[in-house]
């Protein structure tokens, strides 16, 4: 997967960069290098992007992230907010 394909997937899912990093469990630096073409994705990274895309299209990404947060040491802020949506105050 090249940087154009990755950007297209991100755009179609309406994700910000930090949301892709959360979903893929990668650093912002790694993601930036992918987008700039400075670093190539591994086969596992490619599969992870496709899995995130599939889960989002099936409406299961939020449930997966909630499940994942139970087992990760990292603190995830989920659900994400789509462009144009306002947070509930």
Image (cartoon, grey):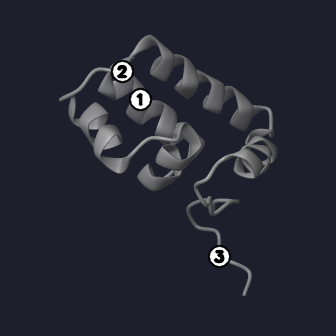
Report the front residue among 85 and 51: 51
Instruction: Say above or below: 6 vs 28.
Output: above
Q: Is residue 71 left or right of residue 39?
A: right
Report the front residue among 27 and 10: 27
Q: Can you give x and y, in whole percent of width and height, for residue 25 in the image?
A: 52, 41
Secondary structure under tag 2 reads loop
Instruction: Say above or below: 83 vs 1.
Output: below
Q: Which residue is mark 2?
A: 41
The residue under the point 24% across, 36% down is: 33
* Badge 2 or badge 3: first in the primary sequence: 2
* Badge 1 or badge 2: first in the primary sequence: 1
Secondary structure under tag 1 reads helix
Instruction: Say above or below: 65 vs 34.
Output: below
Instruction: Say above or below: 2 vs 84.
Output: above
Q: Which residue is mark 1?
A: 6
Give the mark toward the camera: 1 or 2: 2
């Amino acid at each position: 997967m090249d940087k154009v394909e990755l950007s297209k997937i991100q755009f179609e899912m309406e994700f910000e960069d930090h949301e892709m990093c959360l979903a893929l469990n990668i650093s912002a630096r790694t993601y930036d290098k992918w987008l700039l073409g400075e670093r190539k994705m591994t086969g596992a990274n490619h599969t992870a992007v496709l899995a995130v895309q599939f889960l989002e299209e099936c409406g299961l990404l939020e449930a997966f992230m909630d499940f994942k947060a139970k087992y990760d040491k990292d603190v995830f802020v989920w659900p994400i907010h789509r462009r144009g949506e306002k947070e509930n105050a």
